[in-house]
Amino acid sequence: MIPFHRSFVPAVAVALAGLFVTTCPAVSADLGPQPNAPLAEPSPQSNPWQFSFTPYGWMLNVNGNVTARGHTVDVNDSFFQIVEKSDSLLAWMSYFEARKGPFSLFTDVVWADLGFPGHAQDDFNRQASGHPFERFPAVGVSVDANLHIKGHAQLDYQSVIVQSGAGLEVAHWSGPSSRTGLELLAGARYWNQNVDTSISLKGNFTADVTASATFEPRDVLKQILRERGFRLNPRRAKLLQHVIDQRFGSGQDITLSRTVQVDVSKAVAFAQTGDLEWVDPFVGFRLRHEMGASKELGLEADFGGFGVGSDFSWQVVGTYGFDTTCLGTPLHAVIGYRALSVDFSENGKFGKNGIDMVQHGPIMGVTFRW
């Protein structure tokens, strides 16, 4: 055992007390700082970037028409009709957003390779009249023709739509447990569309032909006799005229009409738009209503094109987001409805190509945030 002197313990206590006095500020009995002690200023709150990524599915319904090389096909199919009759059904949709305070950046990507049926129907009606026989100017002919065609088409539709833009919150309203914000949006939407159409045609052709003439039998007979080389003296000519008048009269009206109808047999036409590619600027707004930390409602609308790319395009999206769990894993789910419309056309080498279509349907997705 190591021996200690009695004077050693008080000496150590005095030394520790001196160290404490030299290294710590003086405090009063209530442990508060002295009046001359500086106060530490609180650090400002940081506002970091927040990111979210939402892969989603879009149950497309299609209404409108597609024109490939001058052939226009009407398309009015629901999602279930597309699934039932499609020989290809591939798609990818996702939405990414980066937000810092009132400012946000976003990108939406839609890629789809679909096959679905279409319908084509047209009527071609032409009317014409005239005097086709130079030797018989009194003979007039009129034709009223109609070609009625019905077609069943199969479309292979490949679509890429990339929408990028920025948003700025310009107003907000807060309640006890809710918050509503209004954002203004601006950006550009890139389109790349390719449509192959195969059309099976059926129809019928109807033509009503009517010919009418008013003529003098004496003039006709004289013309025939002259062409045969006969020469009539005045006495014989007068006698022949008397016989013709007794038999036919002084003039005759003749009208002939006939209807011709031909069934058009099946035919198959192939047409391809090629890559239709353009960029539309757009402007719009977005409303977000947050109900606590786990639920939110969203409404977005924008308008674009304005003749820069397409003639006109518009979009409306309504969503509802909420927290849920799947197999014990917490998730933030999003459901809603989206409608996207575009009217674009261009004149190609082999005719007009274009799309005038509304794509709409329910959307469902899952949002990941960090």
Image (cartoon, rainbow, N blue to C red):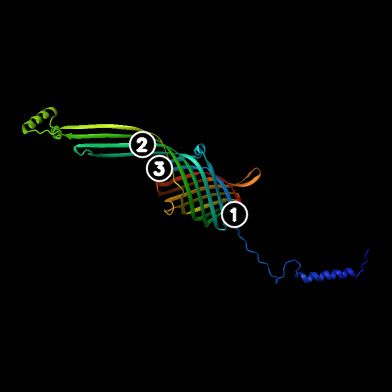
Along the viewing direction, whichever of 351 and 162 lies nearer the viewer:
351
The residue type indicated by label 1 comes to Phe
- Which of the marked residues, 3 or 2, is nearer the chain's N terminus? 3
- Classed neighbour count for the residue bearing mark 2: other residues with Cα under 10 Å, few (<14), some (14–19), many (≥20): some
In the displayed structure image, the side of residue 216 where residue 122 appears, left or right: right
Residue 236 at x, y percent in the picture:
7, 31
Q: Secondary structure at mark 1?
A: strand
Q: Circle 3 sits on which residue? A: 71
Residue 51, label in figure: 1
**Residue 193 drawn above or below residue 12:** above
Q: Secondary structure at mark 2?
A: strand
Q: Secondary structure at mark 3?
A: strand
Whether tag 3 and tag 1 are in contact, CB under 8 A, the answer is no
The residue type indicated by label 2 comes to His
Q: How many marks?
A: 3
- Which of the marked residues, 2 or 1, is nearer the chain's N terminus? 1
Q: Circle 2 sits on which residue? A: 148
Whether tag 3 and tag 2 are in contact, CB under 8 A, the answer is no
Query: Which residue reaches farthest left?
Result: 235
Along the viewing direction, whichever of 264 and 316 lies nearer the viewer:
264
Q: Give the CA distance from mark 2 to mark 1.
A: 57 Å
In the displayed structure image, the side of residue 347 where residue 90 appears, left or right: right
In front of the other: label 3 or label 1? 3
